Amino acid sequence: MTDTSRVEQHPTYSFVIPVYNEEEGLPELYRRLSVLMDQLDGPSEAIMVDDGSHDSSYPRMLELHALDQRFKVVHFSRNFGKEVAVSAGLDLATGDAVVLLDADLQDPPELVIEMAVRWREGYDMIYARRDRRLDETWFKRMSARLFYRTLRRISDVDVPVDVGDFRLIDRRALDAFRAMRERNRYVRGMFGWIGFRQTSVSYVRQGRFAGTTKYSIPKMVRLAFDGIISFSTAPLRMVLQIGFLVSIFSFVAGIAAIVIKLSGMYAISGWASITVLMSFIGGVQLTVLGVVGEYVGRIYDEVKQRPLYLVRELRGFGALDRAPNQLFTQLAQRRSEESAALMNAP
Ligand code: UDP
Ligand code: MG
């Protein structure tokens, strides 16, 4: 294939799709997405990011690319996680509007038509709000609900409740997002943080078309921690308060012990109470240290300044296909131009 196919049309819409072991669902994804792409009011591209799948997702994606040049493929060197896969797709997207979409068809692509209407009205970000969730376990629904509400209460940013990554983003907002290179990424929170004119369209979250969820419970907990710790220092404040309360309590207990001793009321040696107190305070100290450690660990991650992801192969990106690692040089260049442009913006 020649590069001319790539430069022929500047896409209006870019779809960014993270893919991790989704072989059964890909043909149906292609079918529904390509129908939608034909219906949209401008040319579009779909960037599928293979997040180190172990099944045949990658060869299938290459087949799709051979079949339809609008479908482009990014192949990671290993599994980096969905948040990073999405970020890579956003780095490479060239459309005027970019849509984040899950590969499992839980986000109905057809909703994008409605989002595009709002975008044409002038909104910078249109996110899809889950009115109802079908086919998901009671546990998943409840934990998601609890998490979003907690995060909203304690975080410094306005992360909308019951909103996933499914959204349409205007170029302007996307450039702002791209300037954020933090390593512990919680994409929907970062989009909340940048602001801009946002609105939502509501939909019913479908069950998966094929396969099973790629989010195990530890992965979900990790995402939840990233969400809370990247957007809030409330846990630090909380442990400070606990530490303070425990200090007051220990002080009072100490005075009481002295008073009891001096007044000669001592009956038993007090061994039990000392043990209990000591272990209690020890536990509190470890908890406090652990929470502080979470933040320190993340600082360590950030200062290493490693690339966010590593690409093994690119398909459909013109000259970059032959030298995928020049991607980072190019991105760095583009980022410095973008931040200059953002700073000069009126
Ligand atoms: N995904 C990914 N990397 C991962 C886990 C998931 O790229 O490590 C992708 C996955 O292929 C899907 C999307 O992220 O397109 C959402 O994952 P999933 O459907 O498993 O999450 P859920 O909808 O259950 O929250
Ligand atoms: Mg899903």
Image (tube, rainbow, N blue to C red):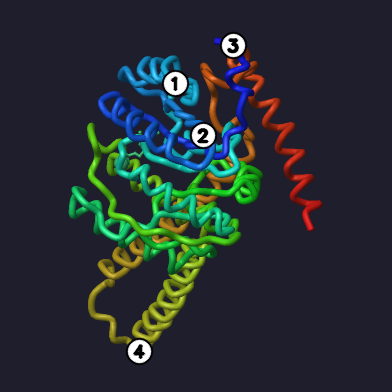
The residue under label 3 is which amino acid type? Thr
Q: Which residue is mark 1?
A: 68
Give how far apart the Cα atoms at labels 3 and 4 are: 95 Å
Instruction: Quote the CA–CA distance across marks 3 and 2.
Output: 19 Å
Graded by Cα atoms within 10 Å as few (under 14), some (14 to 19) or many (20 or more), the crowding at tag 1 reads: few
Q: Which mark is residue 2?
A: 3
Residue position marked by numbered label 2 in the rendering: 44
The answer to whether the residue labelled 2 contacts the one labelled 1, judged by CB atoms less than 8 Å apart, is no
Q: Position of residue 132 (x, y in %)?
A: 26, 58
**From the viewer's perspective, is residue 23 above or below residue 121?**
above
Q: Secondary structure at mark 1?
A: loop
Q: CA distance from mark 1 to mark 3?
A: 14 Å
User: Which badge, 3 or 2, comes first in the chain's sequence?
Assistant: 3
The structure residue drawn at horizontal position 58% and vertical position 55%, both measured from the top left corner, is 124
- Mark 2: few/some/many CA within 10 Å (<14, 14-19, 20+): many
Q: Secondary structure at mark 4?
A: loop
Instruction: Give the CA separation, mark 2 to mark 1.
Output: 12 Å
Left or right of residue 103: residue 335: right
Q: Mark 4 highlights which residue?
A: 263
Q: Find ligand 2 in the image and state its quadrant.
A: top left
Whole-number angstrom distance, CA of label 4 to CA of label 1: 90 Å
Residue 219 lies in quadrant: top left
Q: Amino acid at mark 4?
A: Ser
Q: In this view of the protein, which residue sits in the foreground, 196 or 67?
A: 67
Q: Is residue 206 left or right of residue 252?
A: left
In space, the residues marked 4 and 2 are separated at their CA atoms by 85 Å
Q: Residue at x 59, y 11 (%)?
A: 2
Q: Position of residue 16 (x, y in %)?
A: 47, 36
Say which element carries label 3.
loop
